[in-house]
Image: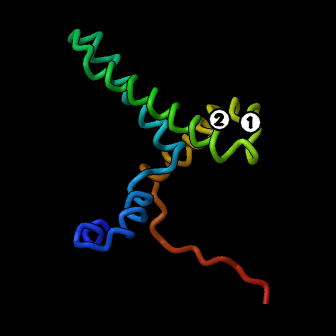
Amino acid sequence: LLVAALRGRFRLLVLAADLIVPPLALLALVQVAAIAIGGALVLTSGAAGPLVMAVGLVAVFFAAVALAWHHVGRGIVAPRVLLRLPGYVLWKLPIYWRLVVDRQRAWVRTRRDA
């Protein structure tokens, strides 16, 4: 899609961008890992640049999610539900771990009631 968009089919660029961005829970977990790695670098080498960049990206992430919620999601998701999002991200952690460690390789056919 990206190659086709760069060759002149610009409408496909939106679809390519949608496929490039991971699910928000996974993106949040990756950002937490980036902050942890940046913190470890500060402690071991004193280099604060990666940590500052990771914290800045997290700020942009939260601002983007808040802006999207404000413009489109207020009628769908109540503000109190947003407070449960960190728990949801932690709930997803075992799912993503299994995806990396114990990936399902065979197709499991869903039973159908005829």
Please identify the quadrant where the N terminus is shown: bottom left
Q: Residue at x 20, y 12 (%)?
A: 45
Q: Give residue 65's position: percent from left, percent from top.
A: 55, 38
Image disc number at residue 81 = 1
Secondary element type, mark 2: helix
Q: Give residue 7's position: percent from left, percent from top.
A: 22, 72
Q: Residue at x 22, y 14 (%)?
A: 47
Is 22 located above or below residue 84 in the figure?
A: below
Proximity of marks 2 and 1: CB atoms separated by less than 8 Å: yes
**Residue farthest to the bottom, as pictured:** 114
Is 1 located above or below residue 84 in the figure?
A: below
Residue type at tag 2: Leu
Secondary element type, mark 1: helix
Q: Nearer the viewer, residue 88 or 79?
A: 79
Residue type at tag 1: Val
User: In the picture, residue 46 is in which quadrant?
Assistant: top left
Q: Say left or right for 75 vs 69.
A: right
Q: Nearer the viewer, residue 101 or 96?
A: 96
Read off the residue under disc 2: 85
